Structures are given as structure tokens and as C-alpha cells.
Image (cartoon, grey):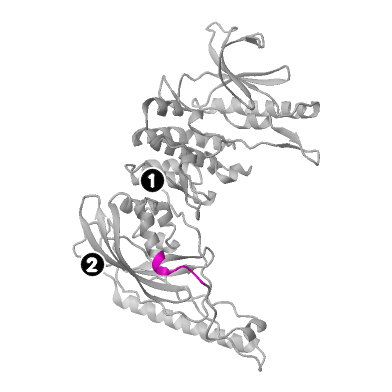
Amino acid sequence: MQTLLNNRYRVIRTLGGGGFGETFLAEDTQMPSSRRCVIKQLRPIQNNPQIYQLVQERFQREAAILEDLGGVSNQIPTLYAYFQSDGQFYLVQEWIEGDTLTAKVHEQGLLSESAVREILINLLPVLEQVHNQRIIHRDIKPDNIILRHRDCKAVLIDFGAVRESMGTVVNSQGLPTSSIVIGTPGYMPSEQAAGRPLYSSDLYSLGITAIFLLTGKQPQELETDSRSGEIIWHRHALSISPTLAGVIDRAIAYHPRDRFTSAREMLDALQFGAGNFPQTVPYIPSPPATVPSHPTVQNTVAVSPGSSPQPTNQSSGQKGILLSSLIIGGLIGTSIVIGLALNKPNQPVVQSSVSSESTPTPTEPQNTPTSSQSTISSTPTPQDNTPSPLPSPTQSAQASSSTQPQIDRPPAAQAVENYYATINQGQYQASWNQLSPSYQNNRRLHPNGYLSYIDWWGGKVQSVDVERVTLVEASAELATVDAQFKYVMKTGRVVPASVRFFLLWDAQNNRWVVSDTK
């Protein structure tokens, strides 16, 4: 290979190579300073005139985007030039003197939480600017982030768009398309691996990068929850604060809908603890055959770490219950009338059932329990009084008005045991997902959503020693379970507790979810 590229750039050494070409460190002989630069040689995966023309067009377009990005932020290398030679394409970019994050970990060991936090805070504004240009990086990983020597700032290198242009092919309809997926296995999420990257895909990659810096573990070395797809990593970074752990958890959520919607939102959560963390799979309970007997809820205010009990207005609570009863009665009566009108005289009339589930309100024990009994209760909230749809005449003839066959489902008591086992393993995201949405969204108990949750379980509780879990009662849709255990606090204090769990059957996801406790 010639040592002088484009009659201008003298190659000093090879920096790396791969399927797309090679990367060189060179010096510009036409500049007085002979400044150093990085030259990326790219080659198309197919070599024919039709493809070459398409690749050339895409390469020029992506090079123009790189030029714009370099002007947006000084934490993206400046594009100096681009050219073509002997059927190959070249980019000439700014040489960043520094160490990749991979080299940093290999040389110095694991990074501290404060160092990782600083890197994230440093990079997220850059990603925000990139995304505002409607560009997705698609290959964020420790090798593609350089800590610049002169100012210690993190610089984002090696955008994937230009490499993708090298994979241009013509499909069966004669249209240009890309035959390759840009990204690194383990660092890219499932939607990107399927060829559909999103802005949150970059946030996922950044979260996985943070885990590597904190634990030294490559993605392939981490376990994955077989049910939820979430990555299990907390056990490798036990000293990390709940806030940072919560931010990373949301960034690497399996489903894009559960991640941060933007780099700005992730930055705010990291700096100010702002943002909601509703990371749960929505549940849709199947309608019961008859009106279920809902457990009695005490008319008291739930107590959560950091909150103070406040008196409730008992008379207004009784009025609310009376009003709810009248509404439910009216709806049931209306359902019966409609059922009589729609059915023929000789056909059995099926009464429409009404779900009277109260909005669940979860909580954790008090910061400083003063008795051996940890009582947790909730304030009644407006009920869902929407009647179930009337069955068709065919369904009416086949269905029994009093009984329905029940589907085999896991024991409710086992669900409670699994909940605490998940907490003891440090899988707070997974345990949070075992709570119903309304349980999560009680702002009195969890003013900052998921952050408040892990502030208690990850910040104050060392472990939970479960002594006994007992099933009290269960129906097709509801279950009541008593649990006796001890909180082992991080201060060394052991606090005995007893909690009654009210569970709802989540038919869509085939599991029990915690809807209330007392």
C-alpha cells in the first residue's frame, strides 16, 4: 500500500481494521503544522458498477452529515475531507488524543460511580444534539468513546451511518437497501438488531457502557431474566447508589417504551432525580364471572419511608363508599334490564358482572419502625365501575351464571416469595415490575416513582429474611397472602414485620401482581 494517500496524507501507522476497511493515523503534508489526522478507508461489500454508484451517492450524503455534526459539538471529531481512490472511499477526520473507555478500564481498573456519572453527564448533551439532527449513532460502546487528554471530555467517535452506506445492495424489486446491521452485539438492543434503531437505542447502548465501566463485565457475561428480558447486573455493583442504578435500569429496559424518551430526560434524571420510572408491563385482568368479594381496606393513610401519617376525614370516606355502592347498584340494575331486552323469552338471562376493584396503593415499611408489627394500609380511591360487556346469545346458552372453569395458574403465595427473592438478588427493576401500575403511581408513597422505590430497597434495606408466607384466600382473580419476615437494615438493625398482600391476576402476562398491602 502506498504511504501517501491522495498525494497528501502520509500514513504513520494502522490503528485498526475490520470488515469495512482499515483506519490509519496519518499526517497532512499540505498543512504547515503537518497536523495528525485519522483516515478511515471504507470498501463496499459488493463490487459492481450499479452498486458502486449507489454507494458513492450515499457516502457523499453521510459525509455531509458528519461535517455538520462536527460543527454541532466539539465532542464529535471534525471532518476535514473525504475522497475516493481505486474503488474505495476515505474519510479524513480530527485525531483525538486520548484513551478509549476500554483502554481506561484495562489500565486503571473499574471506574468510580462519580467518574461514570461525570461521563454520562458529559455525553448526554452531545447525544441530545445528535438526535436533534435526526441522527442515531448506532454503535455507542467503550471503544467508541475517547476521554480527551487536553480537557478530559468524552468524545463520541465512529458514527455508523457511513459504514451502513458500504452495505448498500439492490433488492429483488431493484431498489437500493442496506444488507447489514450497524452495531455491536451486546451493546445494541433488540430493535436495533432487527434493523429498526430508535433514539432510545443509543441510550440503551450508553447504559450498557456504564455497566461495563462499573463492573468490568462485557454484556455477554451478564445474566438476563428469561421472562422479562431485563439484564441482571446489580449484584456486580453493590455499592452503586440507587439513583444511578435506577437511571441505568431505565436506560437499558428491554422494551423501548420503558426507556427514557430522550437524552435530555435521562440527563435530568441523573442530575436532579427527575422523571418518572413507570417500568412495568401493563396488565389486563380478565373479567370475573360474578362480583368478587374485595378485601376490606382500612380507612387510613399509607405510610412510606420519608412520609408522615396524616389524619383522614372518616365521614367523607363513608360518603364516598355510599356513593360508590349506589353507582354499582345502578349499573348492575341497568345491566340486568339490557340483558332482558336483548335475550329471547325462552333463553336464560345472564347478569353482567361489575368489577369493583379499588385502586391499589403499595408501600414499604417505615424508616424507623417502633413496633414489631409493620402495618401498611391505604386510603380508598375511586373505583372502576365499568360493567363487563354483555355476552352473545350463543355464549349465554353455553355459560353458567354461577360458575366458570378456572385456568391453572401459579400459587399466589409463591408470587410473594418470588417478590422478596427478587429484591434480595438486587433485581429492583424486576420486583418493581411485579407491582400493579396504580401501586407504582401512588405519589404519596413514591413521589419520584421508581427512584423512591429503589431508594428504600436499594439504599436502606440490606435484605429480607422471609419466615412464613401463608395463603389466606384465593379466587379466580383475587388472592390474599400473609407474609412474616424480618428487614435487615443496612444500619445493622433487624426489624420484624408482618404484611398482608392483596394480589390481582394479570391474565395478559400470566402472573400475579401486587395490588395492595396492609
Where residue 304 sits: x, y (%)?
A: 30, 60
Pick whichever, 416 or 160, lies toward us.
416
Measure the alpha-carbon separation of dots 1 and 2.
Answer: 30 Å
Q: Is residue 476 left or right of residue 499?
A: right
Pick whichever, 105 or 153, lies toward us.
105
Magenta highlight range = 408-414
Q: Secondary structure at mark 1?
A: helix
At a point 39% along the width and 60% down the height, the residue shown is 419
Pick whichever, 69 or 499, lies toward us.
499
Q: Is residue 325 left or right of residue 510?
A: left
Q: Is residue 165 above or below residue 40?
A: below
Residue highlighted by disc 1: 234
Residue 431 forms part of the magenta stretch: no
Q: What label sits on residue 373 in the rendered view? A: 2
| Amino acid under disc 1 | His
Mark 1 Cα-neighbour bin, 10 Å: few <14, some 14–19, many ≥20: some
| Amino acid under disc 2 | Gln
Where residue 125 sits: x, y (%)?
A: 47, 35
The image quadrant where one finds the N terminus is top right
Figure quadrant of residue 469 = bottom left
Q: Is residue 147 above or below residue 131?
A: above
At a point 38% along the width and 64% down the height, the residue shown is 416
At a point 51% along the width and 84% down the height, the residue shown is 332
- Badge 1 or badge 2: first in the primary sequence: 1
